[in-house]
Image: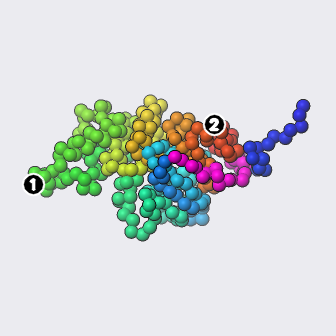
């Protein structure tokens, strides 16, 4: 029998927290991910609190373009808060205080004078529960382009014969095809969207997001309310979308993160980003003992 003591990866002394998560030193190099493309979004020293409670604590992270970045971690570690910071959705939460910067193609989105409507057009969002409008499938998709004036279909345009009817039809078709929904709905575009299945509704919400030509798509657990077949369709879709768009996705499902993402960021208790790297590296050989414990199901 050997006399060896069990050692952690970096031999850092560890303590168990009440959540079962052990505490260890966090090293900056574990989050300093050196990816081989341009950064679409650069986050620096981002902290968020809700009243007295810290939800994110000094996060710095670059998000590579045209790829899928997964955000994983136990419940309450700040994944959704982080996602909402990327298009300033936290502005809608009165108690939220945001410090630090998020740069999108050179501009700090937290600067005064940023046009939030334009920002959220370029950095779109898909939510956990499908939330189509109680309107026709067609109107759901064309709602954004009409609002932004990309297509004109108002009464005056119609009366003067200047309505962009063909343009609108083409945009609806393109967006529904991109969202892998066209074949299922092309013969019932005027039906109410609420009559679609949950999975179809979620792909419609993705089509609605795509219709305004975003560059980044933020997804907050987009498949968590769906059955396995609908989930698999969303996963396939996310991988396809990343050929053209930058996708950032929050998921509780680690197999899903491993299947569809190119890189994974692991957040842990206290709103801390512990490790960010290629997804294969995170799942096969993480640097942090806490990340390994989380991934192998020891807590969370
Ligand atoms: N609108 C809010 N008002 C007050 N506190 C909030 C609000 N949203 C989130 N929080 C708190 O901030 C912390 C982080 O929450 P957040 O939802 O970002 O975590 P999460 O990792 O996405 O959790 P989950 O996986 O359960 O969705 C939690 O302690 C949560 O209670």
- Per the model, the C-alpha gap separating discs 1 and 2 is 62 Å
Mark 2 crowd level (few <14, some 14–19, many ≥20, 10 Å Cα): few
Asked whether 73 or 279 is in front, the reply is 279
Residue 84 visible? The answer is no
| Quarter of the picture holding the N terminus | top right
Residue located at (55% from left, 37% from top)? 258
The stretch in magenta equals 16-36
Q: In the visual, does 150 lie left or right of 29?
A: left
Secondary structure of the residue carrying numbered label 2 = helix
Depicted 238 relative to depicted 100: above or below: above
Q: Which mark is residue 284?
A: 2
Magenta residues: mostly which secondary structure?
loop
Asked whether 280 or 137 is in front, the reply is 280
Is 220 part of what is drawn in magenta? no
Mark 1 crowd level (few <14, some 14–19, many ≥20, 10 Å Cα): few
Residue 87 visible? The answer is yes
Residue located at (44% from left, 30% from top)? 229
Is 29 part of what is drawn in magenta? yes
Q: Which color scheme is applied?
A: rainbow
Taking the image as four quarters, which one is ligand 1 found in?
A: bottom right
- Write down the quadrant of residue 295 in the picture: top right
Residue located at (40% from left, 45% from top)? 245
Q: Which residue is mark 1?
A: 160
| Quarter of the picture holding the C terminus | top right
Q: Is mark 1 within 8 Å of ligand 1?
A: no
Q: Is mark 2 within 8 Å of ligand 1?
A: no
Secondary structure of the residue carrying numbered label 1 = loop
The spot of residue 182 in percent (x, y) is: 30, 35
As drawn, the residue found furthest toward the front would be 36
The spot of residue 268 in percent (x, y) is: 63, 50
Residue located at (81% from left, 40% from top)? 6
């Amino acid at each position: 029998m050997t006399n060896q003591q069990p050692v952690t990866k970096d031999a850092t002394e560890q303590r168990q927290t009440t959540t079962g998560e052990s505490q260890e030193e966090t090293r900056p190099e574990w989050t300093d991910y050196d990816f081989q493309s341009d950064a679409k979004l650069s986050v620096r020293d981002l902290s968020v609190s809700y009243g007295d409670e810290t939800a994110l604590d000094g996060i710095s992270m670059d998000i590579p373009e045209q790829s899928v970045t997964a955000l994983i971690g136990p419940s309450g570690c700040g994944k959704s808060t982080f996602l909402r910071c990327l298009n300033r959705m936290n502005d809608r939460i009165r108690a939220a205080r945001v410090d630090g910067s998020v740069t999108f193609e050179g501009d700090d989105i937290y600067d005064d004078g940023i046009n939030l409507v334009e920002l959220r057009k370029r950095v779109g969002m898909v939510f956990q529960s499908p939330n189509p409008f109680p309107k026709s499938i067609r109107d759901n998709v064309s709602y954004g382009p009409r609002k932004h004036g990309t297509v004109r279909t108002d009464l005056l345009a119609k009366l003067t014969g200047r309505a962009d009817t063909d343009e609108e039809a083409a945009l609806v078709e393109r967006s529904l095809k991109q969202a892998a929904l066209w074949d299922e709905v092309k013969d019932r575009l005027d039906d109410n969207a609420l009559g679609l299945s949950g999975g179809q509704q979620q792909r419609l919400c993705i089509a609605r997001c795509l219709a305004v030509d975003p560059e980044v798509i933020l997804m907050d657990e987009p498949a968590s309310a769906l059955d396995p077949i609908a989930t698999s369709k969303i996963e396939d879709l996310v991988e396809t979308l990343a050929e053209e768009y930058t996708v950032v996705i929050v998921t509780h499902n680690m197999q899903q993160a491993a299947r569809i993402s190119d890189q994974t960021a692991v957040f842990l208790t206290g709103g801390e980003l512990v490790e960010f790297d290629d997804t294969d590296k995170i799942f096969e050989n993480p640097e942090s003992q806490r990340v390994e414990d989380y991934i192998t199901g020891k807590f969370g």
